[in-house]
Image: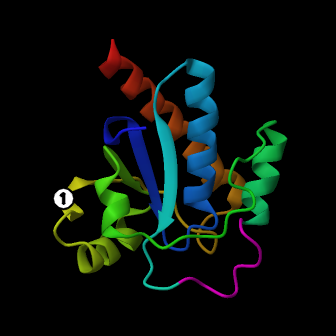
Amino acid sequence: MTKTDRVLFLCTGNYYRSRYAEEVFNHQARLEGLGWHAFSRAVAEKLFPENVGPMSPYTLNALQAKGITPEGATRDPVLCTVDDLAEAALVVALKDAEHRPMIERRFADVAHRVEYWNVDDIEFLDPPTALGKIDELVGQLIGSLQSRSR
């Protein structure tokens, strides 16, 4: 896999939103025959001990309801590094107001490369609505990448 065909999804803890986006993107990309692959990371400076298990139960349940077996179901959340950003052709942070300050503080040299979506975390938006927005945005992203490759 080369940088030209990798997308990096970022959220605060790499436990809920970015993990869902990663799994839905990879599932859809495979179905569409799109030669892109997603991975995800946390933009926080440290991981959150209150996140129990490798992936949010809301994420797991929503993926299972869609018939998607998550490839990364046993992988623990991972903090983002400069190398992760360098390995991605496209970087998407899930919430502008929440993630832009963290990215600009931790990764100032590459912050201009990040595209921002507006999907709130669980304390501001219920999981079905938030994950539904991610479904829609991932679908738009897949369509955009398909158009580019034609």
Quadrant where the C terminus is found in the figure = top left
* As drawn, 23 above or below 81: above
Q: How many numbered badges does the structure rendering display?
A: 1
Residue that appears at 56% across and 48% down: 22
Query: Residue 126, image x and y in percent?
Result: 68, 62
Sort mark 1 into few (<14), some (14-19) or many (20+) by Cα contacts within 10 Å.
Answer: few
Residue that appears at 49% across and 23% down: 34
101 on left or right of 62: left
- What secondary structure is the magenta-colored segment mainly? loop
Q: What range of the chain is rendered magenta?
A: 47-55
Q: Nearer the viewer, residue 122 or 16?
A: 16
Magenta stretch: residue 52 in it? yes
Residue 133 appears in the rendering: no
Residue that appears at 79% across and 64% down: 57
- Give the residue pinned by disc 1: 112
Display coloring: rainbow
Query: Residue 2, image x and y in percent?
Result: 36, 38
Amino acid type shown at disc 1: His
Residue 19 appears in the rendering: yes
Query: Residue 132, image x and y in percent?
Result: 64, 45
50 on left or right of 146: right
Q: Secondary structure at mark 1?
A: helix
Q: Nearer the viewer, residue 133 or 106?
A: 106
* As drawn, 116 above or below 44: above
Q: Nearer the viewer, residue 19 or 137?
A: 19
Q: Nearer the viewer, residue 129 or 45?
A: 45
**In terms of image quadrants, where is residue 10?**
bottom left
* As drawn, 24 above or below 103: above
